[in-house]
Amino acid sequence: MSQTLAAFLTRALERTSSRELATRTGISHTNIQRMARGDRKMLPEIETLQGIATAFELPLYRVMEMAGVDLGIPDDAAGAEVRRIAALGRQITADLAQLIRHIQALGG
């Protein structure tokens, strides 16, 4: 793991406000500030991690790793394969969401 969630959020806060991040992630700006300071002693809820993952277009497993969850994904070739499959899954999800929006726009 190369970066903690606190460090990641601190860097994000250098580029934007906590209120803007709150809007993007669905997490209160005070919780974002606490996580950036490393004040939270407990692991954030999965919904919180998912909000961060979605807002920054990161895989959920990566945000979980930054939060300190050991997922047991090795840094070797097997880990690279897991990461490749996760990226493929994200692309498929994005493609399906786009297809659904297109169908809805057609009135279906």
Image (cartoon, rainbow, N blue to C red):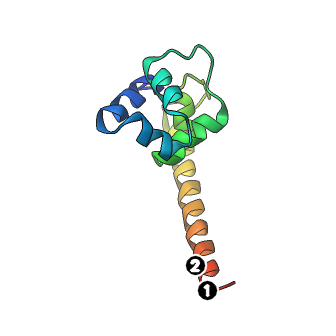
Classify residue 72 as left or right of residue 84: right
Frontmost residue, 82 versus 107:
107
Label 2 packing within 10 angstroms: few (<14), some (14-19), many (20+) = few
> Which amino acid type is marked by label 1?
Leu
- The residue singled out by tag 2 in the image is 102
> Which amino acid type is marked by label 2?
His
What kind of element bears circle 2? helix
What kind of element bears circle 1? loop
Q: Position of residue 40 (x, y in %)?
A: 56, 17
- Evaluate if marks 1 and 2 touch, with contact meaning CB atoms under 8 Å apart: yes
Number of numbered discs on residues: 2
Q: Residue furthest bottom?
A: 106
Q: Position of residue 108 (x, y in %)?
A: 69, 84
Work out whether residue 64 can be spotted. yes
Image quadrant assignment for residue 93: bottom right
- The residue singled out by tag 1 in the image is 106
Relative to 55, does residue 2 appear above or below in the rendering? above
Classify residue 47 as left or right of residue 15: right
